[in-house]
Image: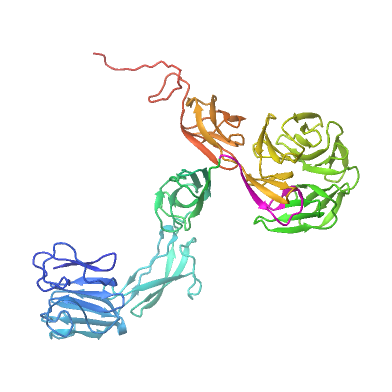
Amino acid sequence: MDNIIVSPSKQTEPYGRGGSNDNGQLGDGTNTLRKSPVKIGTAANWTSVAAGESHSHALKSNGTLWAWGRNSNGELGDGSNSNTSSPVQIGSFSDWVSIKSGFQFSTGVRSDANRFCSTGDNSIGQLGHGNNVNLNTFGCDSITFQCVLSTQAITPLCGELTADLNTGIASEIGAYSFSFYTDAALTIAPVNPVSVAGMYYVKATTSYGCDLTDSILVNAFNPNPSAPTGVNGTGCGTSVSINLSATSGVGETVDWYSESTDGVLLASGTNSFSTPGISSTKIYYAEARNIASGCISLTRTAVTAFVNVLNTTPTISSYINAGINSPEYIAFDAAGNMYVSSASTNTIEKVDVYGFVSTFVNTGLSSPSGLAFDASGNLYVANTGSNNIKKITSGGSVSTFVNTGLSAPTGLAFDTTGNLYVANTGSNNIKKVTSGGSISTFVSSGLNSPKGLAFDIAGNLYAANAATNTISKINKFGAVTTFVSFGLNSPAGLAFDATGNLYAANSGSNTIAEIDPSGSVSVFVNSGMSTPHGLSFDGAGNLFVANNGNHTISKITLAPPSITSFAPVNRPSGETVTIFGHNLQGTSAVSFGNTAAASFTVVNDTTITAVVGSGASGKVMVTNAVCSDSLAGFTYCIRPLSPLSADTTICYGQSANLSATGVMS
C-alpha cells in the first residue's frame, strides 16, 4: 500500500515505502522508490485522492477522474491493461464526485443520474454488476440512495441549529446542505444561531436528489453573548504601547484579535489589552466569550488605539482661510459646528464639522461680536452697533432678547443656572440677564473697556480689560479683583481649557497668552496670529482663534505631555510624588499603576505634585487634552505594620520588626 495525500496547495504528494513504486503507483513519472514526499506534476486543482493496492485514483476540481500505477486487471479503467507511472485522465466525464481504489479494483460515483461505477478484478463479484466478468473500463449502474434525515430534540451549543443526514452509501459521498425555518411551510428563515427555544424545521438538499424536511425541537441552550463595549486608547510618539479595554457581561471574558473576522488572537481571557509598540493609529477587535460554555459574540467590537504625533510645541494650522470677513468671536454648538460673528458684513457664519462655511444669519444684526449658546441650543449675539442682544434658534429664526440697558455690548457668557452676562464695553460694566429677559447690573465699577468673558469651573467670572491690559476676576457676589496685571496687550477673547487654564487673545501683540489658575502668565502662541479676537475650545480640546486682521480662523492643537522623571520612586497611599517633564500645564489626570492619583497639583509647565492613591505598582501616567505620556518604575509600598506577611514591599527609609520560628542547631 502506498501513501498518497493532498497537500494544502492541492497538489498530490505521494510517499512510497519498500519497493512500492515498481508499478508507477506514485505517479511521479518514474519507477523509483521514494522515501520522502514528491509532488505529482504542476497542477494545483486536486480535490481528493485514493490509494489502492498498487494503483491510485484522484479527482480534480473540474470533476474529472485521473489514475496511475498497476493496471494488470484493468483497475485503472482506461480501457487497457498497461501500467502507467504518470496520471492519465479516465474517460471524458466531468461529474465524478467520489472514488475508492481497492485491491486490484476501483469504484466511484458520478452525479449524473446517480451512477455507481466500477472497474478491474471481478473474480468474486467485487464490482457489483451481478456477474464475475473483469472490466478495464468503468461500468456504471444507476442507483437510488436511501436518504434519512435524523429527527430528535437537541440542545444546541450557542444556539447553532444542526442536523444529521444518513445515506444508503457512505455518508462522505456527495454534498448536502441544510436550510432551517421557523414554520412548517418552510417560508420563514430564522437568524442562525437562534435565541429562542421551540420547534424549528429543517430542509435537507443533497447532490443525489434527496429533498427532505423534518422538525427539530430546540431545548434551552447557552446563548451567544453580546459584543463587548470597547474603550479606545490614546498615545503619543513613535513605537508607543497603548492600553485598550472592553467590558462584557457577567460570566464572560474578552479575547482580542487583529481583524474583525478570523485574524490573529492577540490576547485571551482579559478585559484589558496593551498594544505592541505602534507608530500610527490602529484598530483592534474585542470578542466576548462565555467562560462556562465557550460561546462567543456573533460580532467583534472595534477598539481604536489612537497615536498622536509627539510635538513639543502647540501646532498651529489655518482652519478657515476664506468665506469669513473680519471674524470677531466664536462659539460651538453641541454637535461641534462652529459659529463666527462678522462685524463688517453683519452676519453669523456657520462652519460645519467638515470645515464647510455657510451663512447662518444675514439679517437683523449690527456689528455683531460676542456669541454664546444656552442649554437649549439657542445662540445669543451681542449686537455692538445697535446696543441689543439677539436670540437665534437652531433653525435660524432671529428675535430681540434684550434691547435696553446696554452700551456697545461685546463679550457674552452663561452661568450654570442659565443667566446671561454681558460685557458693556461702552459703559465699563457687566449686565446680568435672566432667562426671562430681566436685566440688572452685576458689576458697576473696576472695569475698563471689558470685552471677552469666561466662567471657570467654580463659577467665577473673568473679564478682559482691553484698555488697561488686565483681566479681572469677579466672584458670584460681583466682587472684583485683578487676576492678571501684566503680560497682556489689548486682550479680547477669553477661554478656559478642561484643566482650568485661561487663554487670552492679545489683539495688540498678535499672541495668545496662557494663564494658570494662580495667575502666572506665559506666551502660548507667539506667531501666526493677526489681530486675534475670539477664542473657543472644541470638544476635542483644540483651541480656535478668530483672526480679525487677516480674515481667517486658526486651529491650535495643544502639545502632549512628556514625563522625564519622578521622585521618590516608591510611596504608600496618601504621600506625595513629584513628577517632572514638559507641557504639563494642561494635565487633566495623573495615575500610578493605572490607578488614579488621590489628588494632584500642576505647579508649572514642568512640575506636578501628586498624592498616591491605593493601587498597583507600575508606570506613572499624565494626561492632557491631546493624549497621555507615561514612565515606568513606580513601586507602590505600604507602611510597616506588625506582623508583616512574606514578600511585603515596605517604603524606603522605614523599618519593621521581623520574627521567625525554626530549629536552631
Towards the viewer: 432 or 553: 553
Provide residue 481's location: percent of width, then percent of height.
78, 28
Is residue 323 one of those drawn in magenta?
A: yes
Provide residue 55's location: percent of width, then percent of height.
15, 74
Quadrant location of residue 432? top right
* Residue 511 visible in the snapshot: yes
Provide residue 526's location: percent of width, then percent of height.
66, 39
Residue at the outermost top position: 665
Q: Give the range drawn in magenta.
A: 312-338
* Residue 127 visible in the snapshot: no
Is residue 131 one of those drawn in magenta?
A: no
Quarter of the image that includes the N terminus: bottom left
Does residue 664 lie above or below 620 as drawn?
above
> Residue at point 71% right, 32% down?
487
Residue 37 falls left or right of residue 465 = left
Quarter of the image that includes the C terminus: top left
Q: How is the image coloured?
A: rainbow
Does residue 189 lie above or below 343 as drawn?
below
Residue 545 falls left or right of residue 299 = right
Quadrant location of residue 46? bottom left
Towards the viewer: 524 or 665: 524
Does residue 457 lie above or below 44 as drawn?
above
Provide residue 514's location: percent of width, then percent of height.
67, 36
* Marker count (numbered): 0
